[in-house]
Image (cartoon, grey):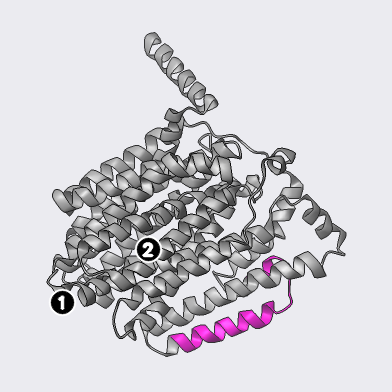
Amino acid sequence: MQKFCIKKYLFIENMLKIQKNLSNLFYALLALPATAMGFALAVQIAALSWILRTEFGLEIYEIGIVWATGPIAGIFGQVIIGVVSDNVWFWNGRRRPFILLGGTLAALMLLCLPNIGIISEGLGIANILIVAVLVSLTLDLSINVSFNPTRSIIADVTPEGRERTKGYTWMQTVSGFFGVMAYVVGATLGNYVLLYGGAVLVLLFSIVPTLLIKEPRYITSEEDTLHGRLDPLLGSTISILVPGSGHFYAKIYTKGAALFFISVASYVVAIFSHGVVALMILFYGIAAIVHIYSIVDAFIQVRSKNRENPEIAKILDSDKTEWDQLFKLYIAHGFSWLGIQSMFVYIIFFLEDQLVPLGFENTERMIGISFAVLNTVGFLLPVLVFEPLAAKIGRVKIHTAAIATMAIAYFLMGTIVQTPMTLYALMAFAGIGWGAVVSLPFAIMSENVDKNRMGFFMGVFNLSVVIPHLIVSLVFSFIIETFPTQDYLFILCGLMLTLSTVSWFFVKEKQKGELLDE
């Protein structure tokens, strides 16, 4: 027993030393919790629709209802968990409890996916769709509960500057590698092997590294707590739950009542429309519009009209968040995801319209290879190329160039693709932008916000992903349906990435001197 205790003590001391020295082994270990959530998401992408269609015969619109749980879970889960994880401390961590709980639940839900039929029979529910929605929603919620803390903890335990960038590029490299492996395993060994093996991997990668990483405990002052109550971004985020209500939370009553009653009236109209699709479009469409309006309105009011209030002025003067840069970053990142998500969701229609008539009929194989190529380039570049280059010329410049490259790749996909090999080559080209999108913006964002509320800002940052996801699902679908040929799909994607590129020119990079001053 004594020898065991001594070995345990030495092991812990070695782990602390590795963390203190910021060795490559530590960065690899730090990347594993985020890898677990990314792998769970990749497994879901690879297997969920396949199971629902082949095993239970669900129609396209029914599968769409199941998939709609993802962005909904992202809107509520990541923001709420982000705020909570900033303000709690138990099990020797702020992020640790949510990573452990979310990872364990995600692993269990992966085991449930191939057993939806058994669960339905056991619960006595005849409608498979109901059980599928519940399992998918629980899986999405568990992923979102953990995703925010797995990204926030990287900012918590790494210093600003190159080491922070290194943390997020390592995250993408390790996570991207296992994401590619998920597609390879599904294509070669089958989705059932992927599901059961994925459950084990998600559980191990969520628990073991999280218990070995030591989190710093930040002490939030009374002033910081007060600042949180008057935070315009927090108030605006609450408006997603009940649009307009964030104005009251942030003590900005102008237009708050009008927005609230307009939203309630819209919900009533949606309910009496007796259409699920109409209800979702109205609910989330209005929520997204009011959310964006609330951010701008609250920001302007707190920053300008209420500055004569000494209490608010004191809080604004002590605020470490670069609000103008933050909004610019969210907009630029949101345009990126409008293009990327459109490709993920609707590429099947492009293949059926453009390549199947030419004799290339295996759309499943073409999609699998396309995404594998995209993700392979995406996980190789962050550590090998982006991280060293960013140290020399800056992350924003690297990211802007990568997004521009992806825009060019999309335009070429919409004009010259005649064979699958051409598509795969251009997917590799687009992978340059993909590798940047899933790594660099996290590091850029983390240095423009209050460090004590990193979880909250990570949660809000995720809205620049899930809101575009909803727009792609509920708005772009109608636009794409009107295209005479589906090569216009990639023209639309290219336009969105072009808008993103232009938006990134307005995002300012923090210089080394500015970081040291803080």
What residue is rendered at 51% in x and 29% in y? 22
Magenta segment's dominant SS is helix
Decide whether residue 262 is among the magenta residues: yes
Q: Amino acid at mark 1?
A: Pro
Query: Where's residue 505, x and y in %?
Result: 59, 61
To which quarter of the image does residue 36 belong?
Answer: top left
Q: Is residue 106 above or below residue 267?
A: above
Query: Where's residue 501, x and y in %?
Result: 52, 63
Disc number for residue 284: none
Crowdedness of circle 1 by 10 Å Cα count: few (<14), some, many (20+)? few
What residue is rendered at 44% in x and 49% in y? 146
Q: How many marks?
A: 2
**Residue topped by disc 1:** 357
List the single residue furthest toward the top.
2
Classify mark 2: helix, strand or loop: helix
Task: Assess whether mark 2 and mark 1 are in contact (beta carbons under 8 angstroms).
Answer: no
Residue 120 shows up from this direction:
no
What residue is rendered at 50% in x and 83% in y? 267
Crowdedness of circle 2 by 10 Å Cα count: few (<14), some, many (20+)? many
Q: Give the alpha-carbon distance from disc 1 to disc 2, as whole Å.
A: 23 Å
Q: Amino acid at mark 2?
A: Ala
To which quarter of the image does residue 363 belong?
Answer: bottom left
Q: Earlier in the sequence, mark 1 or mark 2?
A: 1
159 vs 266, nearest the viewer: 159
Judge from the rendering whether residue 457 lies leftward or rightward of residue 105; answer left or right: right
The segment highlighted magenta reads 246-270
Query: Where's residue 136, x and y in %?
Result: 32, 61
**Residue topped by disc 2:** 409
What residue is rendered at 41% in x and 64% in y? 408
For the N terminus, give its image quadrant: top left
Residue 298 shows up from this direction:
yes
